[in-house]
Image (cartoon, coloured by chain):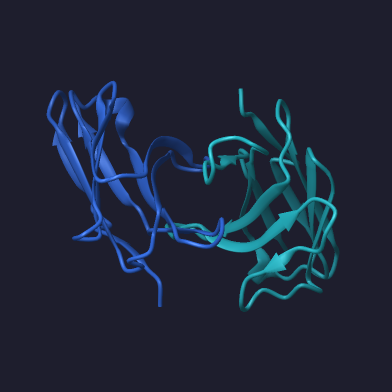
Amino acid sequence: GAVVSQHPSRVICKSGTSVKIECRSLDFQATTMFWYRQFPKKSLMLMATSNEGSKATYEQGVEKDKFLINHASLTLSTLTVTSAHPEDSSFYICSALPTGGPIYEQYFGPGTRLTVT
Amino acid sequence: QKEVEQNSGPLSVPEGAIASLNCTYSDRGSQSFFWYRQYSGKSPELIMSIYSNGDKEDGRFTAQLNKASQYVSLLIRDSQPSDSATYLCAVTGTGGFKTIFGAGTRLFVKA
C-alpha cells in the first residue's frame, strides 16, 4: 500500500515553455501533499505544501506565480513550472500524507527529472 | 535557523559489519524523526520512524533517539552491498507537517 505515482518521470522542455507534473496517491487519500526539489548531491528542499481544496502554502523564496500548484482532489496534485529556465532543471519529488494515517509519515513519488534547454 | 545536520560521508563499511549513521537537529520542539534511504536518481524510501526516546528495531535496522541531546541515529546490522545508498535524516517540528531533511550520509558497503 501507500503508493504514490508521478508523471512524467522525465521531461525535457525548451526555455520559456511550461511543464506540468502530476502526483497521484494510488491506494489512499491524501488531503496534504508536498512538493520538493532536489539538486544533484543536495538534500530535498520543500517548495510548497498542497492542501486539497485550498491554496498551496509556499516556502520562502519559492515564487508562487512560477510554480503553480493545484490540488483538486484527494488523490491528485499538480505542479506547473511556468516559463521554465535552465536553472529550473532539477529533480522534482512529491509526497503524500495519508488522510487519517500515521501522522507525519509521508510517502514519496518516484520523482520527475526536468531538464530545461 | 532550524537545521538537521548529518555527516556527508562517504561512510564505508565491509559487508556484514554494523553501519552507524548519525544526525543532530536544532529544533528542540521536534516531535517526529525519520530515516529515509535514497538510491541515486530515485526518490527517498522511508526506512524507520521514531517518536519517543530510546531504541526502535525493525529487522536489521535500529533507530535511536535522544531528545535531550537532540540526536538521532540509525544502525544497520549485517550490512549488505544493497544497503549502499544515501541515508536522509528528517525531522518534523511541532505545530505542523513541515519536515526538514538533512543533506544525507552516503554509505558504501564493500563486498
Question: Where is residue A9 shown, x and y percent of the image?
Answer: 69, 40
Q: Check the rendered structure and report the hue given to chain A.
A: cyan
Residue at image position (82%, 53%) is A20
Q: Check the rendered structure and report the hue given to chain B.
A: blue
Question: Where is residue A105 shown, x and y percent of the image?
Answer: 52, 41
**Quarter of the rendering containing residue A114:** bottom right
Residue at image position (75%, 37%) is A24
Up-down relation of residue A83 to residue B43 (above or below): below
Asked whether A32 or A3 is in front, the reply is A32
Residue at image position (21%, 27%) is B79
- In what quadrant of the picture does the C terminus of chain B appear? top left
B1 left or right, relative to A1:
left
- In what quadrant of the picture does the N terminus of chain B appear? bottom left
**Quarter of the rendering containing residue A59:** bottom right
Up-down relation of residue A21 to residue B16 (above or below): below
B67 left or right, relative to A41:
left
A36 left or right, relative to A7:
left
Q: How many marks can you see? A: 0
Asked whether A107 or B96 is in front, the reply is B96
